[in-house]
Amino acid sequence: MLNGISSKELYRNVINFKSSPRTLKWEWSYWGGTLDRWYKEGLPEKKGLTQKPTYGESVRGYFVDPFEKNRKGKLVLDYDVAEYFSLDRGYLFLPYKFFYFLEFEEKIVYENENYIEKYNELGIKIRTLKDESSMPMWLEYPVVDRKSWETIKRERLNVDNIMSRFDGSIDNFLKVLKEENLPVYLGDFYGFFGGLRFLMGEVKLFMTYYDDPSLIKDINKHLLNIWLAISEELISKIEFDAAYFWEDMSGKNGSLISPATFREFMTPYYSKITDFLKAKGIIKIGVDTDGDVQELIPLFLEAGVNMMFPFEQQAGNDLIQYRKKYPELVMIGGFDKNTLSKGRENIDRELEKMEWLISQGGYIPFCDHAVPPDASWENYKYYRQKLNNIIESTKVEPIN
């Protein structure tokens, strides 16, 4: 807390382009192998991690989750890096099922010393390395035709009892929320591309845009109606600071779908839910998508989304140009994580962008995805200490 100002107040100031003593000192996440390396290279091990991660498993930054036990151990949290650099508290996770109400039972179908093949909680058959050092191979998806979609819609995607999707006691959540005074998001929602990826996979999705567009629209209409109902119920009980959707719909060369496809199959549904959320007082609505987002930014803004994360630099995103072109867009992340393995000159070049971006408001700086194990502890210390100094010495003073 800075002079009595909480993370929640700082967050609200920054994302709403208000004057603020500073922006937030956050770091999103690290690989498990990164933390293992840093402990060996000098990171003091005081509190440790909430559980031992695999080499490639994501370790979240100092983002508080008092309901971690309800997550079946799926979330690994860091405390030592956060305390070493006096990072700010993060947002409070909402223990709620925004997608399937009844998840699939996880089932291992094959295992050897290197990898596991299994059906996960989303009903997707995956092959994953045991150390999680690379992304899983996605083998099968639950929606293969209209009949399988109707079954999932009926059995796993319904709103018969909205609050039964809440994991644990909402009264306990409200108590912790009041005590912690942290930002809280409505979501993460799997979006109108990301949700369909989990249902049918990219190849089937791309073909279905052309072969059976009415099925795509039926799925997105159903997801929209579920999320509208869920949002109305939760907003009546909880004060949210923002809403978030997950898409991951771009790669190094840009969007995975055309603007015309976006406008036909995504814009109508996003527009309805963003209009609804803003009418309810949630005026900042973000999307998480990797890759080159240059083509997607105006499409999302047109559909009512006004916040984006993580702006990967290896995909060519230019945050300074984005800020100049889209002054209303809240940007989060964007520091090139790959410079952490390339030495101080490259780190300094990235840090030079930060002061101006911070001063404009609507910007929270940290690495553009999970910090990888090729980043030494010394290089990370250099980056984080200098970034903290920039944050502490740069007042947020938006022009507009």
Image (tube, rainbow, N blue to C red):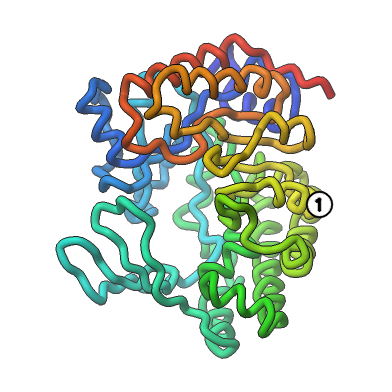
Outermost residue toward the left in this view: 113
In this picture, residue 2 sits left or right of residue 381:
right
Across and down, in percent, residue 51 comes to 26, 43
Q: Residue at x 57, y 48 (%)?
A: 291
Across and down, in percent, residue 7 comes to 57, 26
Q: Where is 110 relative to 98, above or below? A: below
Residue 239 appears in which quarter of the rendering?
top right
Q: Where is 269 relative to 147, above or below? A: above
Q: Residue at x 42, y 74 (%)?
A: 123
Q: Where is 310 relative to 287, above or below? A: above
Tell me if residue 83 can be seen. Answer: no
Q: Nearer the viewer, residue 159 or 120?
A: 120
Q: Which quarter of the rendered picture does the C terminus lie within? A: top right
Q: Nearer the viewer, residue 389 or 380?
A: 380
How many residues crowd mark 1 within 10 Å: few (<14), some (14–19), many (20+)?
A: some
Across and down, in percent, residue 266 comes to 72, 64
Q: Amino acid at mark 1?
A: Glu
Tell me if residue 148 can be seen. Answer: yes
Across and down, in percent, residue 399 comes to 82, 20
Q: How many marks?
A: 1
Q: Secondary structure at mark 1?
A: helix
Residue 13 appears in which quarter of the rendering?
top right
Outermost residue toward the right in this view: 400
Residue 55 appears in which quarter of the rendering?
top left
The residue carrying mark 1 is: 302
Q: Residue at x 49, y 24 (%)?
A: 88
Q: Residue at x 72, y 47 (%)?
A: 297
